[in-house]
Amino acid sequence: MPVLSNSQKYNLVKIMNDHIPHAALLGIQVERIDGEELTLKLPYQTALVGDSDAGTLHGGVLTVLLDQTLGMATVCCDTTEPSVTPTLDLRIDHLCVAPPGMDVFASARVYKATRKILFVEGYAYCESKENPIARATGSWVRVADIDLSWLVPTDQDAV
């Protein structure tokens, strides 16, 4: 399969993201794709607050956002075909809390791909990438025998 365009990657990630129940429930959205880097957005919701006095996001929600972003970033890797990729390992360093009332973004990219394992790194932030609230690394298993090529829209079908 040839390298997917940004619009093909965007549409494929959107289809997959919208069909994952917890991502849909949390309102996680595809923000942008820039080459092999994916950015997802978690809109602020009072229902996701973990500390009601401070109004800050629950840490578990941030974990879901990072797991989703790093896992979906595997679709954007130009050296492998898109495939189903369950999480094998995920490490998150929580650097600070998300400021109350702010949307959270997470960006990720594959930094090493083998035949079976994809190694991914990313971070979550609110105001700027230069001031992350969390950093994550992990590995995802390629389930290569599940063909996703039928989900890849042509550029003419792109949103």
Image: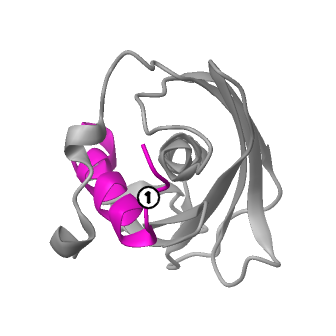
**Quadrant location of the N terminus?**
top left
The picture quadrant where one finds residue 92 is top right
The picture places residue 124, in percent across and down from the top left corner, at 66, 62
Q: Please indicate, yes or no, whether residue 20 appears anywhere in the rendered image.
A: no
Give the answer, above or below, for where 79 lies relative to 157: above
Coloring applied to the structure: one colour
Look at the magenta stretch and give its main secondary structure.
Answer: helix
Residue pointed to by mark 1: 4
The picture places residue 50, in percent across and down from the top left corner, at 53, 52
Residue occupying the point 37% across, 67% down: 45
Helix, strand or loop under label 1: loop
Dot 1 amino acid type: Leu
**Quadrant location of the C terminus?**
bottom left
Q: Please indicate, yes or no, whether residue 138 appears anywhere in the rendered image.
A: yes
Residue 33 within the segment the image draws in magenta: no
Residue occupying the point 65% across, 21% down: 115
Q: Is residue 54 left or right of residue 46?
A: right
Q: Nearer the viewer, residue 27 or 2?
A: 2
Q: Is residue 52 left or right of residue 20?
A: right
In this picture, which residue range is highlighted in magenta?
1-23
Q: Nearer the viewer, residue 8 or 18?
A: 8
Give the answer, above or below, for where 140 lies relative to 65: above
Q: Is residue 138 left or right of residue 12?
A: right
Residue occupying the point 71% across, 54% down: 122
